[in-house]
Amino acid sequence: MILRGVATKGLSGLADTRLEGLDRVVRATGSPRCRRALSDALMLGFGALDPLAGARALGWMRIAAKLDDGHWVMTWPDQLHGLLAPGPTNTVSVSLDLELDPPQFGQLRQHAVHDPDLVSALGNARLRLTTGWAFTPNLTLGSPAILSARLGDHHLDREKKSWVVPWLVSLASRLHAHTPRPPNVELWAQAQRSPDPARRSAYQRAIQALKRPPFSIGELRVVETGGKRWLVGGEELLPLTRLGPLVCNAVALVESVFLDDADILVVEEPCALTEHPRALLNWLARQATEPDSPLEQVLLLSGSGDLQLSPPSLDPALTL
C-alpha cells in the first residue's frame, strides 16, 4: 500500500493542508512544528481505524489513553495543548488517498463474490479514506471515527456491509512513524525465535543491514541472563547503551524497517540519527525502491520553513 495524497483539517501548525502526487520516496521539508503536525496527522488518520492503533498513536504523542464506554479517556491533557487549531469545534479530520497492493485487491475480490456492487469498483486501485477525531473542550476525552471510505466512485457502506469495517481496520497497522527511542529487545528476541520463516528472514536481514554501511556496528545479538534480555553489539558484544546513542538510534531504525509490519514508514529528522546523513537517506530510499525491499514507501521529514515537498535533488533516489 502506498500513500498518494493526504489532506488535513483542524491541526495546529499544519492549517488545512493537502499534499498530492506522493511517490515511494517522499522528502517533505518544514519547521519542526509542521513536521510533527504531519506525523500526528498520519498517526491519527490511520489510528482512527482501530482502537489499538489509536492508542499507539496517542501514546506516541506521550499521552496515556484507554477506551472507556466507547470513548478515549486521556490523562495528561496538557500534552494535547497545541494539537488542535483554534476554532468552534475541537475536531481533526484526515483524508488519505491510498493505492492498494495486490494482496488487498485479492481480499476485495473475495468480498465481491458476496457483494456484487463491489465488482464495478475493482477496476480502481485508489481508496479514498477520511477519518476524524472529536475532543471535548478540556481535551480529556477523544473519540475516533471512520467518516467515509470510497473505492473509486464506489462508496463502501460501513453500516450495511459486514466486511467493510474489519477490512478497513486491517489497514491501521500499515503505517509506522519512527521517532528516536530505545530498541525493543523483546521484538528482536521474538523475531529471532519465531516459527514463521518470513519473520526469521526479516530478523536476519536486519542483522546483516547493521553490519554494513551506513551503520557498520558489527554483530548484534540478543543475550539473556537471569530471565532478563538485552541487546549487545560490536566486536566486544557490549550493551548498546555502552556504544552510544547513535548506535541505539541505528538499531531502532533498522528495527522499524525490518521488524515492524508496516508498509509505510515515516521518519522525522532522519539526518539527526546518524553521522552520515546522506548515506542514511540513500539507504532509507532503497528500502522502498529496490527489488524485495521491506517497505512500500518511506516519508522523510526534515528541513525548515513552511511544509512543502522538496524539489528534485542531486540524488535521483530522493526526488519526488
Image (cartoon, grey):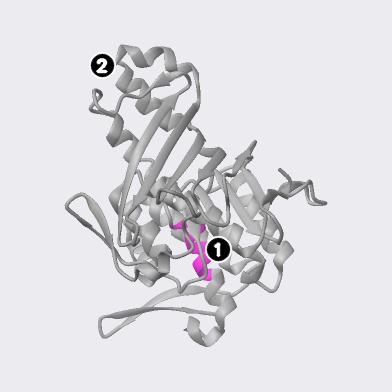
Q: Are there few (<14), some (14-19), or many (20+) residues within 10 Å of tag 2?
A: few
Q: Is residue 12 visible?
A: yes
Mark 2 or mark 1, which is nearer to you? 2
Judged from this view, the residue extending furthest toward the front is 88
Q: Quadrant of residue 19?
A: top right
Residue 138 image position (x, y, % from top left): 33, 62
User: Could you tell me what secondary structure mostly forms the magenta stretch?
Assistant: helix
Q: Which residue is nearer to you in this view: 104 or 9?
A: 9
Q: Which residue is nearer to you in this view: 149 or 88?
A: 88
Which one is earlier in the sequence, the residue at label 2 or at label 1? 2
Residue 183 image position (x, y, % from top left): 45, 71
Q: Can you tell which mark lies on residue 208?
A: 1
Residue 175 image position (x, y, % from top left): 46, 49
Residue matched to label 2: 114
Instruction: Check the image and report above or below for 15 versus 7.
Output: below
Residue 36 image position (x, y, % from top left): 55, 60
User: What's the amino acid at mark 1?
Assistant: Gln
- Secondary structure at badge 1 equals helix
Q: Is residue 213 visible?
A: no
Q: Is residue 258 magenta?
A: yes
Q: Is residue 235 magenta?
A: no
Tell me the distance, in whole angstroms, between the alpha carbons under discs 2 and 1: 45 Å
Residue ID at (71%, 43%): 320
Residue ID at (36%, 46%): 48
Residue ID at (67%, 66%): 271
User: What's the amino acid at mark 2?
Assistant: His
Residue ID at (39%, 26%): 106
State left or right for residue 206 relative to residue 157.
right
Judged from this view, the residue extending furthest toward the left is 69
State left or right for residue 213 relative to residue 296.
right
- Span highlighted in magenta in the image: 251-259
